[in-house]
Image (cartoon, grey):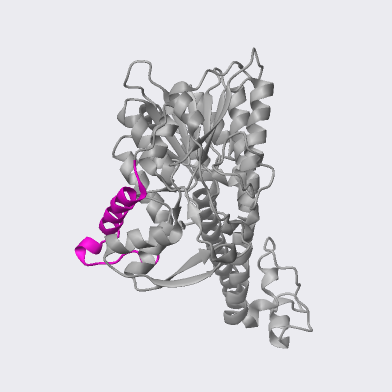
Amino acid sequence: MKTKLFIWSSTFSSFFSSRYRPFQSYLPAFLPNSNFTSTPSSSNMPHQLEEELFPSTPGKIKSDRRTFHRCVASTSTLFLWALFLIALTASYLSFIASSGSRYLHHTSHDWKKHVRSSAQIHRKNGFSVLVTGAAGFVGTHVSLALKKRGDGVVGIDNFNDYYDPSLKRSRRKMLQSKNIFIVEADINDRRILAKLFETVPFTHVMHLAAQAGVRYAMENPNSYVHSNIAGLVTLLEQCKEAKPQPSIVWASSSSVYGLNDKVPFSESDRTDQPASLYAATKKAGEEITHTYNHIYGLSITGLRFFTVYGPWGRPDMAYFSFTRNILQGRPITVFRGKDGVDLARDFTYIDDIVKGCVASLDTAGKSTGTGGKKKGPAPYRIYNLGNTSPVTVPALVGILEKNLKTKAKKNVVAMPGNGDVPFTHANISLARRDLGYNPTTDLPTGLRKFVKWYLSYYGYNDGKDKSVNS
């Protein structure tokens, strides 16, 4: 706000300097309460004006000149004060719109009404779930699934611009049509979290908010610490103080397996060799959640997702960007590992991931603490959620070409040292046993559904292409 006022003041100063230069040197004489610091003197004032304003002989200034100068002073003063008040009002409104209004809005009666309505449970023994990252890819699908079966759902999302925010707002519009309310705020905002828990006694938290992406960590590392570590701790602090404490399910990542070359990856495998900052923050998250489980009795389940894809997905993912570029006739970059080996991923369709998330909520034991004090041991679990069928990237491209009926222009290059790993493969035996997790969608089926959504959402069915800037 101070910066805005300074800019306005500088503008006013320039305005008067250019248009009232003859009066600039003695204007302070008429505006004793102004911010001008100069004083009139014979050295910078025309002799005639000096004589008229500061006569050596009393009574020299005639009444008509005195009246004229007083009018000038009065008019100038009023004009300055009018501009100052306009600037002050504009700066205040801008300040409220950009920062203060968010919290004020979140404490209003209407805001609480929306939150309570969204959190209302419509099934016997249902849950009231706070979903963080609710406007994200997985968050949107999980929220819809919970609401559909009668659970209460309230979302929170900061709508950052890591990728096109308009896609997130389209997801929010879809959620709103199902009476799912999303609070637009950062999970690091303790006041907002406190207000949410004060408004609704959440039984569960589905924590999906995170800074995603392996390669982006090289461009903006602080965003990963802010969201994946600081944001997680802020949320856990709120959960530990809640009465009652909620059960927590959160998204870790298959990236924690890092440079581990033992496949398929199992939950008991070593995870102390991260290949990227993103992976390191997710590994740190697993250690942090274990600490809060041990000290405060929070029931916590971590889910290691394996390359999730599907409708409403993230534009930064390879399958999404490949689709866009193929349709626009642009080349795609296909990486290869050492010795020309094709990269492979355990691609997992979004509907299968959602089933795993919901099953984790259903089987989560209760937290044992209250108000930050532990009363007994609470469950701590980690599961792989994958498809168990790795597919090479060239095979992925071939499936897309078939569905898009267009040949891709491929640039095949060696994989750079940017944190990516050459191969992922999930062992899901624990999730099968404890959650009843059973993925059923293979990659050709899942990509066909994705392409159908993509063509519809971006207007290709209408002969348009709205994905140019996506």
Count up the numbered dots.
Answer: 0
Q: Residue furthest top?
A: 375
* Res 135 visible: no
Who is closer to the viewer here, 288 or 239? 288
Q: Is residue 434 left or right of residue 422?
A: left
Report the residue at 55% width, 49% height from top. Answer: 211
Q: Position of residue 268 (x, y in %)?
A: 62, 33
Q: Residue 324 sits in which quadrant?
A: bottom left
* Res 398 visible: yes
Q: Is residue 236 left or right of residue 82?
A: right
Figure check: 69 above or below 384:
below
Q: Residue 142 sits in which quadrant?
A: top left
Q: Could you tell me which quadrant the C terminus lies in?
A: bottom left
Q: Position of residue 63 (x, y in %)?
A: 60, 74
Instruction: State yes or no: residue 448 in magenta.
Output: yes
Magenta residue span: 441-469
Q: Residue furthest bottom?
A: 47
Q: Residue furthest left?
A: 462
Figure check: 21 above or below 449:
below
Q: Position of residue 183 (x, y in %)?
A: 45, 39
Who is closer to the viewer here, 383 or 110? 383
Figure check: 443 above or below 46:
above
Q: Is residue 369 left or right of residue 170?
A: right
Instruction: State yes or no: residue 62 in magenta.
Output: no
Figure check: 240 above or below 190:
above
Who is closer to the viewer here, 441 or 119? 441
Q: Position of residue 160 (x, y in %)?
A: 50, 52
Q: Residue 114 sits in which quadrant?
A: top left
